[in-house]
Image: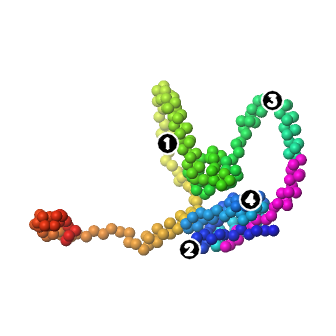
Amino acid sequence: MAIEIRVPALGESVSEATVGQWFKKPGDAVKADEPLVELETDKVTVEVPAPAGGVLGEIAVAAGETVAVGAILGHVRDGAAGAASTAPAAAAPAKEAPLKQTEDATEAPKAVKAESAGNAKPEPAGGGMPPSPAARKAMDEAGVDAGDVQGSGKRGQILKEDVAAAVEKGQQSHASAAPSAQSTASQAVAYAAAPAPVPLQQMRAPSVTSDAAREERVKMTRLRQTIARRLKDAQNSAAMLTTFNDVDMSAVMAMRSQYKDLFEKRFGVKLGFMGF
């Protein structure tokens, strides 16, 4: 039985969206309400959850394509039977694994065990849940890895607040180690010799080829496209210029000087140029 994954209602006056990315691939097991795909609109970014648990079937719309509200994004197939049939077959190797690991542990030297323990990778944070779009953007800007952030969202999902807390924690630890590092650096600078001047042969102007290699063109999101379109419309409809007009205010200034004291005594306020 296949259950359709459709584009949900995206709000008033929003009739279409762009597929950002798929969090799962065809054949992956999914849980109910687990985020499957990210949709970008002119206003917000929405995550579409799985309508039911099972296995992700075919993906009808690839990333980068535009879809309308109510369109079919893919299907979720019932994978309970397949999971139940493969469970006994996977249980037998799991029982034999501890015995084999025990024999290998007795024969392996201690140095090998210490090295394997040091190379063990920590379990990724978030319980397998992908970070939210805002959290993913914050991690890219701060240069933080997802394994260093403890998620506090639903099923351990990493939120934007979790990224901010991890960055603040890292800054505090860096600040505590700063005095010792500064003292060591000051001693090194005191005893270090002056750096040798760079020869003129090694200095060259940046080439066009090297600058072009560093360029990266990234497709704008729907929100950025809307902002750019609105700015261009404003530039096309409004006059982008400044005008100056010269006015002879000699007579007005003379009249103000003549009546400003009398005006202030009668009305209690000063006579300004705006009154003319």
Residue 266 location (% of width, % of height): 13, 67
Q: Which residue is mark 1?
A: 203
Q: Which residue is mark 3?
A: 109
Is residue 249 in sight in this rendering? yes
Identify residue type, mark 1. Answer: Met
Q: Quadrant of residue 110?
A: top right
Q: Depth check: give the residue in front, 203 or 128.
A: 128
State the quadrant of the N terminus: bottom right
Q: Earlier in the sequence, mark 3 or mark 1?
A: 3
Is 65 situated above or below 155? below
Identify residue type, mark 2. Answer: Ser
Q: Which residue is mark 2?
A: 13
Q: Nearer the viewer, mark 4 or mark 1?
A: 4
State the quadrant of the C terminus: bottom left
- The crowd level at tag 2 (other Cα within 10 Å; few <14, some 14-19, many 20+) is few
Q: Earlier in the sequence, mark 4 or mark 1?
A: 4
Q: Nearer the viewer, mark 3 or mark 2?
A: 2
Judge left or right: residue 196 versus residue 273: right
Mark 3 vs mark 2, CA separation in Å: 68 Å
Q: Earlier in the sequence, mark 4 or mark 2?
A: 2
